[in-house]
Image (cartoon, rainbow, N blue to C red):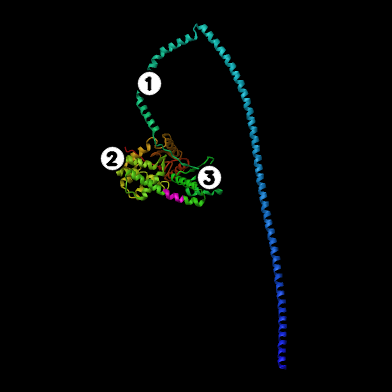
Amino acid sequence: MNSLVFSILLVVIGLLIGLFVAFVINSLKGSMASKKAESIINSAKKEVDKIKRDAAIEQKEEAHKLKMDLDKEIREKKNEMKESEARLLQREASIDKRDELFQKRETALDEREEKLEARQLEIQNEKSKVEDIRKEQLDLLQKISGFSKEKARKEVMSHVKENMSKEIAEYIKEREDEAKLTADKTARELIVTSMQKYAADIASDQTVTVVDLPNDEMKGRIIGREGRNIRTIEAITGVDLIIDDTPEAVVLSSFDPLRREIARVTLETLIKDGRIHPTRIEELYDKVCKDMKQKIIDYGHDTTVELGLTKFDPGLIETIGKLHFRTSYGQNALQHSREVAELSGILAGELGENVTLAKRAGLLHDIGKAIDHEVEGSHVDIGVDIAKKYKEDKTVINAIASHHGDTAATSVISTIVAIADALSASRPGARNDSLENYIKRLTQLEEVGNNMDGVEKTFAVQAGRELRVIVKPEEVDDLEAHKIAREVKEKIEETMKYPGTIKITVVRETRAQEEAK
């Protein structure tokens, strides 16, 4: 019994001791946790203080920067205001000077008008005096002669009529003979002039195209912010855009009709679409180029079909279509080639030659003009190369080479093509180059060569397509001749405007002559 009580007592004592130990441990843990929490709080306070200081410094720097920017903007505004004020003062001074000048001029005009009125009055008085004197002299003359004015006039006219009747008859006879000689010539000139005035197709060489706008606000959208849209259009199309005070219109300027047409279609599509920015401009330009290429092929195909010609390479068909966008003195190159083909076919039929071959040669005679702005050389040489490339008949190649007389014609068809070319180009209204302008251009060409030192004479041949410069052999050697050719070329390019190319040939000839006796 005592042992049981003792055991229970020990258990109770152990529990008490355990509770005490647990209490002590918990107290120690709480103390440590409070110290740790206090440490964390202190660290957080320090971090918050640091952040506040950094924020305050950053805010001060930002405020300082804003203040500096504001001060700079204020200074710029003040400078602009000063410049504007200076311009206004200058303009005001200019207006004052102009007003003073106008006042002086008005005063001078008033004085001049007064002087003129006084002078006019003096002249009227003098005129009245002269008229009175003339009447007195006439009355005195009538009294002395015993003839009145009317009687004297009749006597004089009768005397003149008797003396001049023979001369008048001879004059009338001469005029009648001259009229008979010139009647036929005058009638032909009148008929030709009438035909020329009635000609339906008149050449019109244009280098600009006008694009209509729905309103003037569209001009600003075409120009774009800081001009980026108009710069993009001009860069990718190679065409100059002229935006001036003309209402609701933009002018496209270029010497290449194909570039101008592509630019026109692109710009009109942009205006209809409404989305005008560099990316959209490039997209539409690529699309229009593809469509235009197909249109060129259609032009070439339609032409060959209308002429009844077949077996053309697709590349040659496209080149023929490009002639639609080339002109010579305002005459459409494709229309001219079509006319030459038709005329060549008619002439060949009358002479019993191959009509189809003549039409083919006539159509291709100016094929070089389709790409003469892309490839260096005359359109004749370029056309011969194109014909050889597509393996055309030798007769066609010779017709191309000889239609301007550069090469001798080796067949009747070549001669026919040259004749048809001259007929198409010279018909009334075909080209806008008058005889006066033609002669003026040839004279100017010859003057360029004649003004060079050592040149004896200069001749413009082949309708101004070639310039032959004859030099003095005793003053110009072979090297100097090359230099003169280059200087003449540069002078022509700087001072003249001309279609196609001009070939400059410097001739230096030395002749040694002896006579055997």
Which secondary structure is most common in the magenta stretch? helix
Please name the residue that numbered disc 1 is placed on.
175
C-alpha span from label 3 to label 1: 68 Å
Figure quadrant of residue 363: top left
Whether 163 is among the magenta residues is no
Determine the secondary structure under disc 1.
Answer: helix
Which numbered mark, 1 or 2, is in the foreground of this view?
A: 2
Q: In x, y percent, where is residue 427?
A: 37, 36
Placement of the N terminus among the 4 image quadrants: bottom right
Q: Going by the image, does 221 lie left or right of 404?
A: right
Q: Is residue 344 visible?
A: yes
Residue neighbourhood size for the residue with mark 1, other residues' Cα within 10 Å, grouped as few (<14), some (14–19), many (≥20): few
Mark 3 or mark 1: whose residue is earlier in sequence: 1
Circles 2 and 3, Cβ within 8 Å, touching? The answer is no
Magenta highlight range: 285-292
Q: Going by the image, does 128 lie left or right of 195?
A: right
Residue at point 62% right, 23% down? Answer: 115
Please name the residue that numbered disc 3 is placed on.
218
Q: Which mark is residue 349?
A: 2
The three-letter code of the residue at mark 3 reads Met
Q: Going by the image, does 121 lie left or right of 358?
A: right
C-alpha span from label 1 to label 2: 48 Å
Residue neighbourhood size for the residue with mark 3, other residues' Cα within 10 Å, grouped as few (<14), some (14–19), many (≥20): some
In this view, which residue lies farthest toward the front?
A: 1
Q: In x, y percent, where is residue 85?
A: 66, 42
Residue at point 57% right, 14% down? Answer: 130
Q: In x, y percent, where is residue 459?
A: 40, 38
